Image (cartoon, coloured by chain):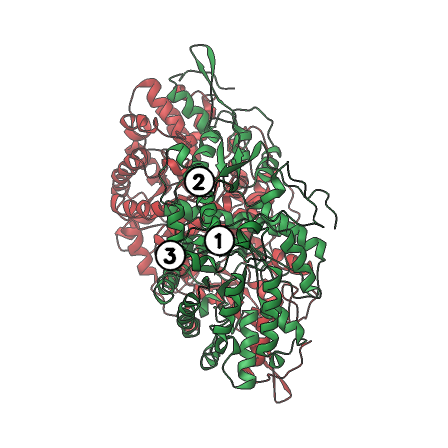
Chain colours: A green, B red
Amino acid sequence: MKNENIKISYPNSEKIYKRGTLYPELKVGMRRILLTPTVKNEGGKRIELPNNPVVVYDTSGPYSDPNIEIDLNKGLPKLRQAWIEKRKGTQMYYAKKGIITEEMEYVAIRENMNCEALGIKTYITPEFVRDEIAAGRAVIPANINHPESEPMIIGTNFCVKINTNIGNSHENSSIDEEVEKAVWSCKWGGDTLMDLSTGTNIHETREWILRNCPVPVGTVPMYQAFEKVNGKAEKLTWEIFRDTLIEQCEQGVDYFTIHCGIRLKNVHLANGRLTGMVSRGGSIISKWCQVHNEESFLYSHFDDICDICAKYDVAISLGDGLRPGSTYDANDAAQFAELDTMGELVERAWAKDVQAFIEGPGHVPMHKIRENMNRQIEKCHGAPFYTLGPLVTDIAPAYDHITSAIGAAMISWYGTAMICYVTPKEHLSLPNKDDVRTGVITYKIAAHAADLAKGHPGATIRDNALSKARYEFRWKDQFNLALDPEKALEYWKTSNKVGGKFCTMCGPNFCAMRISQTLESGECNEEVV
Amino acid sequence: MKNENIKISYPNSEKIYKRGTLYPELKVGMRRILLTPTVKNEGGKRIELPNNPVVVYDTSGPYSDPNIEIDLNKGLPKLRQAWIEKRKGTQMYYAKKGIITEEMEYVAIRENMNCEALGIKTYITPEFVRDEIAAGRAVIPANINHPESEPMIIGTNFCVKINTNIGNSHENSSIDEEVEKAVWSCKWGGDTLMDLSTGTNIHETREWILRNCPVPVGTVPMYQAFEKVNGKAEKLTWEIFRDTLIEQCEQGVDYFTIHCGIRLKNVHLANGRLTGMVSRGGSIISKWCQVHNEESFLYSHFDDICDICAKYDVAISLGDGLRPGSTYDANDAAQFAELDTMGELVERAWAKDVQAFIEGPGHVPMHKIRENMNRQIEKCHGAPFYTLGPLVTDIAPAYDHITSAIGAAMISWYGTAMICYVTPKEHLSLPNKDDVRTGVITYKIAAHAADLAKGHPGATIRDNALSKARYEFRWKDQFNLALDPEKALEYWKTSNKVGGKFCTMCGPNFCAMRISQTLESGECNEEVV
């Protein structure tokens, strides 16, 4: 595999590391964006006032560290290897025992960035992290066989996280392209990555991704099991599924989406729907149930699944096989029956020290979103919610990153811990690299909007720094602070030249910020350019 | 001006007209999207079940009527001329007298589409429209000198409307391009159009737009007044502004944004802000107040402004000169002081039978949006709210159509009647045609999401028809029902062939909808492709 152009760089930014206190060997990577000074004219004298650098959450791992050489053929450094070797239980196991692991301190540091240096009080301490994990309200997905992964936390009291989906299918794309997309997703800010490959080479594709991925990797193991029976749902067995789980645990998958919430008695509830079942895993296991007229083996073997996951500290993402595929089907009996089952299962997972979270819809009009969140909290005992959107209308294929970002921002504000990105190609085709970028940035917007609304410590720092740069016409600082500095610069360049105290949107005379500044400085009769 | 390619067509759609009852001569244009039948296989026999056409709100006017020849040099047919000629007051004047005008019946028909034919009960009757206008809760912007415009209504109990901004500046673009953008905006669904030209040829540009625009046109008259004093705010006078208003009323502008809410005593409130003033009109009049140390002539001459507007039935959009330009400045004293003043002024406008609405922010984090709406309703006595976004975070220049669509959808659900689009180039550059399209579609999404959430009669028809088409693999119907059929088809074509019962997103074996259908039909052992 070629290593050219695989490194990640951000404009005017440095890779920094913050050390642990409980574990001084911890090195938590962050990105520090350097800013130019504010220039003022005071009494004819030019003075420069420095602007603090802004430290932001960084998902790019070693790819953005100029001191680490990347060789995709060797894989990333095994950051967590030494911590793992002494372990004998899951993160939840230690949390319940009152023990703070390296991962727990790592995520506490990571969430806070440089908050405290700026005098911002934070509630996110290593002990708080431990307590949230012990209570099941947060998850650190970290398979003992994925030591390359940088610890991150999913929970309502932390930064809202975003997941990106990649993966080839029978129809499209190569392993090289998928690894490239994985790194690309990390560059733009993807917090976890699901490999949804369904084509040939599932195992090999996943291996390349895992060894080179600095963020947790999730899968839907049913996809591989389904390939093993050549796409005949009725030929699936618990044994085939179990062996697939073990295979993936051994490789290092950090979390599994499993549709254990589908019960034989509930499959018929989807019959009256406008759009039936739109979950791949859900429709496969439902078909199995119906053909065999038997309880789903994912449900009946749930304790066995938990035992496997506990051994490797793999988190379970309880998949919503009955999520609505249209706003018409939102919040119906099928959806909520499955949620009830998931509430039962999550407690059984916790009893075996398995970390778990709950997947949610899908397609939901705005006025029905709150009910989803409230029910999930009630029925699932505070386990983190992980939703796909929801899309708030069905009439905009080709823009479903937007229809879904509206719902995703709202439900995250209400309490959802992680949101699964949607690209512009949703419902239409597999996304290309550009679609992945658009999807990731769109979801970073939704997640960050929720962080602001929920009052996450330090969430406002970047907004305020960017707004100040904008007001002071520090264009490059504005772009460098943006979620997508390259695109902002590209758009600006379509009609502007560097150094101007206005942009072509308004022109010089009509620049409100320019006029506003002459007001504040009292220089009201100043000539405009 | 060239007429080539100016006509608008939508795939598999017909232009239809619905007649009035009170005024049988009324012909309300709509777009009817024709659908293919659902094909089923029952007992080996192929049967076709027809799908009802879907009638949608249509802003494209005569441009999409194949029977009307368009000549931009002659202008559009004068639809409202005969109605206007017998008038002696504004829409509000008649509404208060209990008289239903042609425009009122027109908008009632337009809002309902073919609801009643589908058995959907609607509260939107001509009498309801009259009552809303009489109470000031809704506005029909319709200058007596813009008879080419098709009546539309702005109010919280009607479809949420979207405005698009076009206009050249000193730096960019020609009159031809602006007219082309105006028609382009109507094609994609813009409900009103603001001509924000600030360059040379302001008068001429506006004339071409007005004569060829089937939707109401708004302006910020201050921009032209400011050009008349060569960009020296301090040289502005009431007389120059008044003459500009009259000039624009004579041309046919349907609504004016005027920043009458800025008061001398409140200008200083913006001083402590992170981003000062970001309204062009607001910063200009603030500068005038400060230089002259005098009350704003827009405030002190408000009754004179109303007298002029009443004569032509021009609506006043009370501009928010002190809107926040960053999430940091949201909901501050400056913003709310101006809102209080607007609440006072709107009652004075109503006293003179002038229709009015209130402009709102801007940049507001999600948790502060509701307060904006609640205060506006309380302070402004139910007058329609017309907001710019709001953007829910500041960190995504180049994606501010999305940051703002999140806020726009939410505030529309809470009650905002019209939202002003934001394009991807916001904060960076003037939008091109492609940006206008992206901005319009993004805002149609936000508006429609709110219509669904508010339960507008018939809002779900299009969503359900599209979802049904999606589930039945009627791909072309799905695209034709989409807000942007062309883009949906284009994306789908990147990797698909017509006629398939799956798309490359999942491939045939993993298509959940395909599996789901075999479940419902009981054909569980069917071979997959």
Can I make out residue B70 in this image?
no
| Chain assignment, label 1 | A
Local secondary structure at mark 3: loop
According to the picture, the residue beneath numbered tag 2 turns out to be A21
Q: Earlier in the sequence, mark 1 or mark 2?
A: 2
Q: Estimate the spatial distance between the alpha carbons at disc 3 and disc 1, rounded to whole Å.
A: 25 Å
According to the picture, the residue beneath numbered tag 1 turns out to be A405
Location of residue A243 in the rendering, given as x and y in whole percent from the top left corner: 61, 72
Location of residue B13 in the rendering, given as x and y in whole percent from the top left corner: 58, 63
- Tell whether label 2 touches label 1 (CB within 8 Å): no
> Are callouts 3 and 1 both on one chain?
no
- Which quarter of the rendering shows the N terminus of chain B? top right
**B12 sits to left or right of B330:** right
Disc 3 marks a residue whose amino acid type is: Phe
> Are callouts 2 and 3 both on one chain?
no
Local secondary structure at mark 2: loop
Disc 2 marks a residue whose amino acid type is: Thr
Is residue A351 or residue B271 the one in the foreground?
A351
Q: Residue furthest bottom?
A: B43
Location of residue B341 in the rendering, given as x and y in whole percent from the top left corner: 27, 36
Kindly indicate the quadrant of the structure image that contains residue B263: top left
Disc 1 marks a residue whose amino acid type is: Ala
In the rendered image, the vertical position of residue B477 relative to residue B406, given as above or below: below
According to the picture, the residue beneath numbered tag 3 turns out to be B158
- Which quarter of the rendering shows the C terminus of chain B? bottom right
Kindly indicate the quadrant of the structure image that contains residue B145: top left
In the rendered image, the vertical position of residue B487 relative to residue B475, given as above or below: above
Is residue B274 or residue B16 the one in the foreground?
B274
Give me the residue at 53% from left, 81% from top. Answer: A289
Label 1 or label 2, whichever lies nearer to me, is 2
